[in-house]
Image (tube, helix red, strand yellow):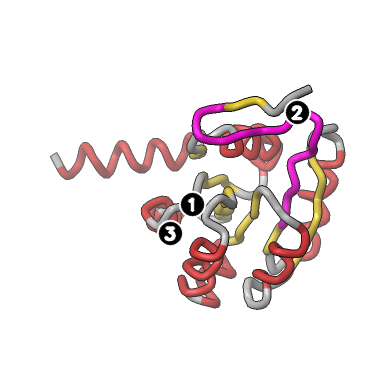
Amino acid sequence: MSPLSFGRTRVDVNRSIRVAIADRHENFRVACRRILELESDFEMVSESSTGFGLSPLLELMKADVLLFDEKIWEAEGQETFKSIRKQFPNLKILYMVSSEDWAGGIEAMQMGVNGVIEKGRNTAHLPKAIRKIVDGELWMSRKLTSALLRAEFQRS
């Protein structure tokens, strides 16, 4: 089969979506790996507990998607994210939040992440969210969408 085009993104239907994850919690990385292993079109290619030094792994493993934890963003600042975004402009980034504080998710969207997903009970949506951002769409959890709309209406 030949590659398919979805918007601006080309997806080869014979190739797995290559996923890297940067999350401080090993148990969460394991849970994500297990969720994605249940799907035939995903391959977990790299895991890191920090964002520092992530660029060489992303280059070596040719990841399509990076799952990026909010706690790494908070601990290491935005510079790690900016560096990754600059070095890998085609890399899709799914920002993972664990709290009800959506300000970081909104800020991450403004800086160019492709989606924001809530960790925990909504992790079951992870495969769908990854597929959507690979297809060129933005992904936001319902809670983030509600928070954005509420904030917009309150400004009016």
Residue type (three-letter) at the residue carrying disc 2: Val
Give the quadrant of the C terminus.
top left
Does residue 128 appear in the picture of this structure?
yes
Q: Is residue 107 left or right of residue 43?
A: left
Q: Kindly identify which residue carries mark 2.
A: 13
Q: Is residue 89 left or right of residue 122?
A: left
> Disc 1 on helix, strand or loop?
loop
Above or below residue 63? Residue 59 is below
Q: Earlier in the sequence, mark 2 or mark 3?
A: 2
Q: Kindly identify which residue carries mark 1.
A: 113
Magenta segment includes 152:
no
Q: Earlier in the sequence, mark 2 or mark 1?
A: 2
Magenta segment includes 12:
yes
At horizontal 69% and vertical 28% (from top left) the residue drawn is: 3
Does residue 94 appear in the picture of this structure?
no
At horizontal 27% and vertical 44% (from top left) the residue drawn is: 151
Depth check, mark 2 against mark 1: the one in front is 2
CA gap, disc 2 and disc 3: 34 Å
Looking at the rendering, the stretch of residues picked out in magenta corresponds to: 6-20
Q: Kindly identify which residue carries mark 3.
A: 104
CA gap, disc 1 and disc 3: 11 Å
- Residue situated in front as seen by the camera: 132 or 35: 132
Q: Residues within 10 Å of mark 1 (few under 14, many from 20)?
A: many
